[in-house]
Structures are given as C-alpha cells and as structure tokens.
Amino acid sequence: MSEIPEKTIERLSEYRRTLLACHNQGITHIFSHVLAGIHGITAVQVRRDLMLIGFSSDTKKGYDVEVLIDFISGILDSPNVVNIGVLGMGNLGQALTKYFNGRRSKLRIVASFDVDGDKVGHEIDGIPCYGMESFEEQVQKSDIKIVILSSPTSIASELVVPIINAGIKGVLNFTSMPLNFPRGIFVENYDITTVLEKVAYFVKEAEESTDAQN
Amino acid sequence: MSEIPEKTIERLSEYRRTLLACHNQGITHIFSHVLAGIHGITAVQVRRDLMLIGFSSDTKKGYDVEVLIDFISGILDSPNVVNIGVLGMGNLGQALTKYFNGRRSKLRIVASFDVDGDKVGHEIDGIPCYGMESFEEQVQKSDIKIVILSSPTSIASELVVPIINAGIKGVLNFTSMPLNFPRGIFVENYDITTVLEKVAYFVKEAEESTDAQN
C-alpha cells in the first residue's frame, strides 16, 4: 500500500472533496463516470485509482458516497491530528492560515513564525506567532510535523537547515525557490506562479490556433 | 509546437525562474544535471524538455543562462501583456494579487471583483475592485483574458456562466469545487488543500515505514 503514486494521492484528495460536497447535498451514490466528469478525467482513471487502494464496488447504483469517503479517509488521514507550522506570516502566510484552518480538522495550523517585531508575540487569526529563534523549541513543544513555507523567496534557502534541525517531516514550499531536503523529509515545491504561467500559455496557444484557422 | 505537454510547460516555467535567479547571481552557464538537481529531477528529463521546444546546446560549459531564459520566454510568453482579473477579494484573493503583481510583467492583474460593499468601488493594493454586475463590462474594457477564481467554494459554480459570457479564455480556479468549461476555455483547478493533504500522506507513510523497521 506504500506504493501509491503521488498523482493518485492528489486525485484521492480531490475525489474526497467532491464526495463530501455530494454527501452534503444528500447524494448517496455516484457512478465512476459522473465522478470522472466532475474532475475532467476518464472513468477508467477513477476506477484504476480506487482499485489501487483496494476499493471495489459492484452496485448498480454506483459507489456508496459515504463508504467511499470513509475508505479514502482511511488511506489519506493520520489517525491523529497533524500539527502544522507556517514559516512567514506575510500576506500569503496569513491567507493560507485562514484558508486551511476551519477546514479539515485532521490538519491543523498551530503556530506561525516570522521575524517581524510587529507580529512576533501576537496572535494572528488565533494562531500564535513566534520569532524564528524559537522555531526549534516550538516545533518540539507543539509536536509540529509539517511546515508551510510562505517566506520571501530570497530567504527560503536559509530556512532549510532550521527545518532539518527541528525534525520537520514534510514541507509545503510556496516560495519560488525549489528546495531539496535529505531523504526522510517530503517536500512539495508549489510555486503558484508556475500554474498562472501555464494557464497563460494554453490561452496563448488556443488563440494562435484560432488565428491560424481564420 | 502546439503539442507540448502540460507538465513540460510547468517545468519550463520552473526552469526559467531558476535561471533568472542564477542570472541575478552572475552565473552565465549551467549544466543540465545542475538544473536537474535543483528541481529534484533527472538530467535526462531536463534535456528532453528542452529538446521538445527545439533548444539545443552543445557547449562544454553547459547551457548559456541568458540565451535559455530568452528561448523559454519565447515559448511561454505572449508578445503582449496579458491582463488578469481576480474573482473574489477575500484573504486569498488579496494575497494572490499582492503575490503576482510586481512579479512577472507579462501577466498583470488589472481588476478585481467582489460582492462586498466595503470593497466594491475601492482600490485594493492599487487594483480597482468592481461589483460582479459590471464583470462583463470590465472584462471588455480592460481586455481581461484570464481570471483567478478565489471566491468562496460555495459560489464557485455560479461564476461559470458569467465567465463564459464575458469571453474569458483561461481560468485559474483556487476554490475546492472543480469546474468544467466549454472547449476553448482552459481551466486549471488548483485546490491548495490537495497538496497539503498529499504532504501529510507522505509524512504518514514515511512514519509508518520507520515504525515497521523498528
């Protein structure tokens, strides 16, 4: 079960959110092609992903929404709450904190860190903000496993060693600087600019092919 | 040239940011394996991506950084500035606006839209905020091609028809609701929760395999 590809994990997370939305609307069953259509992929892909995690369903009504939510949660979620710290409480850090907290209860932002004297020692949206000098101490105290990195890109690489030393196990890096960590620390480099440039590229391509047809 | 895969486009965008950082540090040449190492991929992958866009380099010093930046920019960028609108100026919308503007000059956020009377009619970080009722009009006036969707997830699906009607060509959707658009409108569904859940999953997996070894 440890061999589930990253892309499948992403899709499982996406399926679950769709299923939760369906569940909230009172929908009890969903066909693979309906779930696939919502996500813009093929039904074969959905069935393959679910087969990979050992979920099988042969009802004529499609997948049982509630059962499938629980099954996916059993794969994705830790049995316990996972504590998260935010490194860098600028606009992006604050927006991400508001965005994540009050959502999934299993992933909880419990502390933030900054160097700005106006922020350190205060609570921001109910989350205490500490100075970087107490990062390691607070990670131990609060049992923080994952950090969200939303510092300025220019200082991102300076944070690698403190993150390693503090015993962090996962990094979600929102800066524009791709970071490498030793084996045992999972890092996802997630520069938002990339995806905007991608959208712009495909818009440009579509326009050029329209122009060529005219 | 219209057949470049989405993943290659993403990597080209990432390579360019790394190359720009190198250029700013006075680095003039870079080997494929160095570029690959920074991005945690293989040199073969880097060379394959660059071959795909027709870039070849056979110098013993590696790729010429400046030449490669220009070459990738010729692929990714429109000749003109692309105007972008932000739908939903809550915390995430405001953070994204600050994050994107003042970065790449070819992609420019020129307008935002909200339903909050405290925001409509004002400038937020120098960007005018309009009411949703003038969305179509402002898209025409400002020649907006792409929208960033940062509204509450609960109203995301209500925005599909206005986006189509306004003639938008690309959508970067940050809500948790995956959206489908007719052919001709490129959409990237980019729920940030997915990636945090993914990091948490791989942290959990690593812990379980460590526990199993002990």
Image (spheres, coloured by chain):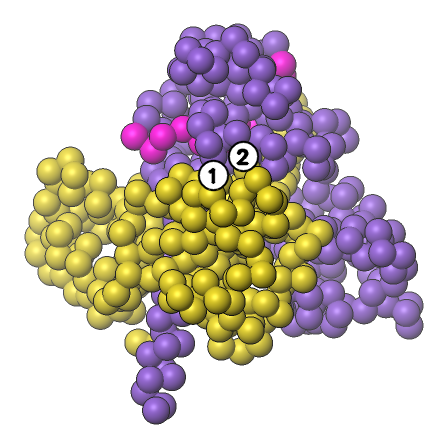
Chain colours: A purple, B yellow
Q: Secondary structure at mark 1?
A: helix
Relative depth, front residue between B211 and B71: B71
Q: Is residue B4 visible?
A: no
- Crowdedness of circle 1 by 10 Å Cα count: few (<14), some, many (20+)? some
User: Label 2 is placed on what type of residue?
Assistant: Ala
Residue A62 sits in quarter:
bottom right
Left/right placement of residue B150 relative to residue B177 reads left
Q: Which residue is mark 1?
A: B95
Is A165 placed above or below A26 here?
A: above
Labelled disc at residue A95: 2
The residue lying furthest to the bottom in this view is A214
Left/right placement of residue B69 relative to residue B141 reads left
Magenta residue span: A142-154
Whole-percent x, y for residue B112 in the image: 48, 51
Q: Are marks 2 and 1 in contact (CB under 8 Å)?
A: yes
Count of marks, rendered view: 2
Q: Is residue A19 visible?
A: yes
